[in-house]
Amino acid sequence: MDVELITIGDEIISGHTVDTNSVYIAAKLGEIGLWVTYKTSVGDDLRRMEEVILQALKRADLVITTGGLGPTDDDITKRAIVKVFKRNLVFHEDVLEDIKKRYEARAIKMPSINQNQALLPQGAVYLPNKTGSAVGVVIVEGTKIFAALPGVPREMETMVAEELVPFLTGRVRQEHIRVIKLRTTGIIESALAEKIMPITKLPESIRLAYLPSYGGVDLRIVSFGPTKEMATAPAENMAKQIRELVGSYIYGEDNDTLEGVIGRLLKEKKETLATAESCTAGLLAGQITAVPGSSEYFERGVVTYSDRSKMELLGVSENIIRAYGAVSTQTAEAMATGIREKAGVDYGVAITGIAGPDGGTEEKPVGTVFIAVASAKTVKSKKFTMGGDREINRRRSVYTALEFLRRTILGID
Amino acid sequence: MDVELITIGDEIISGHTVDTNSVYIAAKLGEIGLWVTYKTSVGDDLRRMEEVILQALKRADLVITTGGLGPTDDDITKRAIVKVFKRNLVFHEDVLEDIKKRYEARAIKMPSINQNQALLPQGAVYLPNKTGSAVGVVIVEGTKIFAALPGVPREMETMVAEELVPFLTGRVRQEHIRVIKLRTTGIIESALAEKIMPITKLPESIRLAYLPSYGGVDLRIVSFGPTKEMATAPAENMAKQIRELVGSYIYGEDNDTLEGVIGRLLKEKKETLATAESCTAGLLAGQITAVPGSSEYFERGVVTYSDRSKMELLGVSENIIRAYGAVSTQTAEAMATGIREKAGVDYGVAITGIAGPDGGTEEKPVGTVFIAVASAKTVKSKKFTMGGDREINRRRSVYTALEFLRRTILGID
């Protein structure tokens, strides 16, 4: 069955907000074998909203909108629904009570405009909102299912996971899908493609996509079938073949992250970690600790932005900084060794570089980054040229350091 | 004139990639008075891609696609263009030369599949790609303009800014737009709306949107007009009225960020800053240093994840941690005072809390965060309940600490 997602709001089409809602919904629907075929965004414009919803109901069997259910004047989705489905708005006392309770719980007086949110299209099923005041609306007409969800990500996500998905499961014909994501790093998309080429003559029922990001290139295999088995076998077979060809670049699967994989390795080995950062200024520590329970192996981190702090917190000698500069192999290695010793951990990771836009030189242009990893045995460092703007250079440095660390822990180069 | 953006790729509709490209394009088009009216996303599916492009050419005057121009098999946008516009692909020697040069510059041998990228639809104008191998394609047919851009954000962004926007400027009728974004924090959307209500009876030519995010609620005023003056005056007048009503919640305008505003304040006052973080583990330092030149006022940061590191790096006494816990007012204040003294700076900011999912207690549930700011005069701290998951609690804590710091610097509560 065809599924269309419609995200509503001027902020979505005007270049002020990134739409993460449709990403979340598509992923959740995928888990029950529903495959999104179209995504449309439209502004807070009643006429165009009606037009887009009508078109979606023509070409898709399940239509889900997000946004425009708030209490404020620019939230007009319900007005569009009323027109499209030719239904009146009905006042729901119980919905208003829930909203009032929510405000009381936060010890805030409910603004009177929130009353609008208790008005729902006639005959609609409503989906409770556990984290906000805008309830969801579901209308079933013939073979078509229409759902309107709030635009605030947290509210929408809870509603999809706890209300919409259970509502849909069973009600819709499900095609089985098996998605396998192989996560690679340290190789560019087209080089990866050339290595995989021999096996990419694919049947209609299977798709291979290359998804490049700062962290590397993900290979996503999507396989469809009328039964679980018929969807699963081809996907797993292809994953096996790809591993044989490019396994050395694959650090994980599906929802694995570099920081998560590193966390698992450190827990297994009962080893610990500390970080010393200059240009990334805490982003490496922040990413390592995105993993729940990371306090088991992450002892501390320091952001040594000034030369003084490098000397005081890491014992980097003034001579090294004078002789080679704060951005150098020597300083990176001294930082890694320093944090490892001060923190008394197994691994010390250090990043020092020139994020930009200023501070570049002939010899060390913006994007030059030195990364070092110190372990009980050795301290190793590498020079990288990130070649992006300030933010990209900082992000790439974090991923590069994580991969450097992963390989050090595994003892591979 | 109506503008439609089409983002292409399974990864966009399948819940694996967030579409930031259309956000960037919409913002750039806005700068030359072009207003995006529709956004559509479709997978790597030739039939649907054709259908979506044809529909866009019907309802919009300018159609821009991103994605599917890469060298790999799943990149089929050019095949769709050839069918929609009934044109052949023509080989461009000069394009191939450029691609080869790019690989040589990186000392990588060009994979032969990149040759596909030198094939362009007959009669198309092509847009050079300064940062990648996929050139852009522009087709002008009658009053309609169609442009196909690569999907890799950096490549697309450079191409839009340096090639497409100059190409479009002048060629298209331009409506003038004035966008003013007032950035608020510390007040919820509906409370803000009630305060602003008196002035929100708006003419057709002006729009007010509420854009909530982790950092607060942005108020976006968009005003249209046939002349610059007729677009500008109403927007600025409304901004003035809103400032009179809710000015105390407004920390900045347009592209201002909390960290940027704080940076300006510290530079003006020639004051310096250091951070001590537990649950946010470097994300605060990372955000403060997202500002170019922040090394002028940011001296250092520490991520004291373990109790030992809190004592060693910040001089927090073991007694305080024993008596009140690592997550407490007393520890937060000791951390802020400690980092301020160790770093020898004007302001010390500290965050300690329970990000979750584990570690919560009856008395201090997940989401409990203590934030302290130490200055020459005093040390102040506050307890917050973030009420989200691990990531949300960490992000909210960072913004809350930044606003706490901003108010401390300005001497307001």
Image (cartoon, coloured by chain):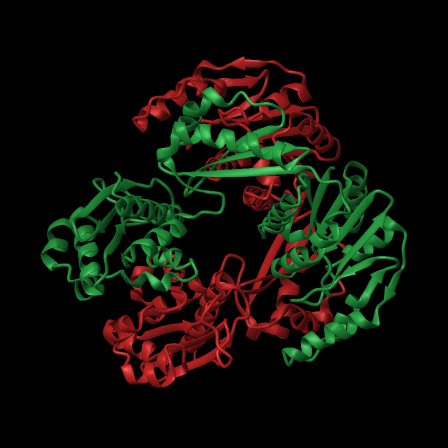
Chain colours: A red, B green
Query: Taking the image as drawn, is residue B137 in sight?
Result: yes
Residue at 74 percent of width and 50 percent of height: B168
Image coordinates for residue B349, horizontal then vertical, percent: 26, 53
- Between A138 and B183, the one lying in front of the other is B183
Q: Between A85 and A142, which is closer to the camera in this rendering?
A: A85
Residue at figure coordinates x 78%, y 36% from the top left: B59
Q: Residue A406: horizontal and vertical position, in percent?
A: 44, 72
Q: What residue is drawn where x is 71% and y is 54%?
A: B166
The total of numbered circles placed on residues is 0
Residue B241 pos. (x, y %): 45, 27
Q: Is residue B304 above or below residue B357?
A: below
Say above or below: B361 vs A146. below
Of the 4 image quadrants, the one containing the N terminus of chain A is top right
Query: Which is more toward the observer, B400 or B303?
Result: B400
Task: From the viewer's perspective, tell me whether residue A375 is left or right of residue B31.
Answer: left
Direction front: furthest residue? B229
Q: Is residue A170 visible?
A: no
Left or right of A331, for residue B16: right
Residue B340 point in image, percent of width and height: 21, 59
Residue A230 left/right relative to B120 = left
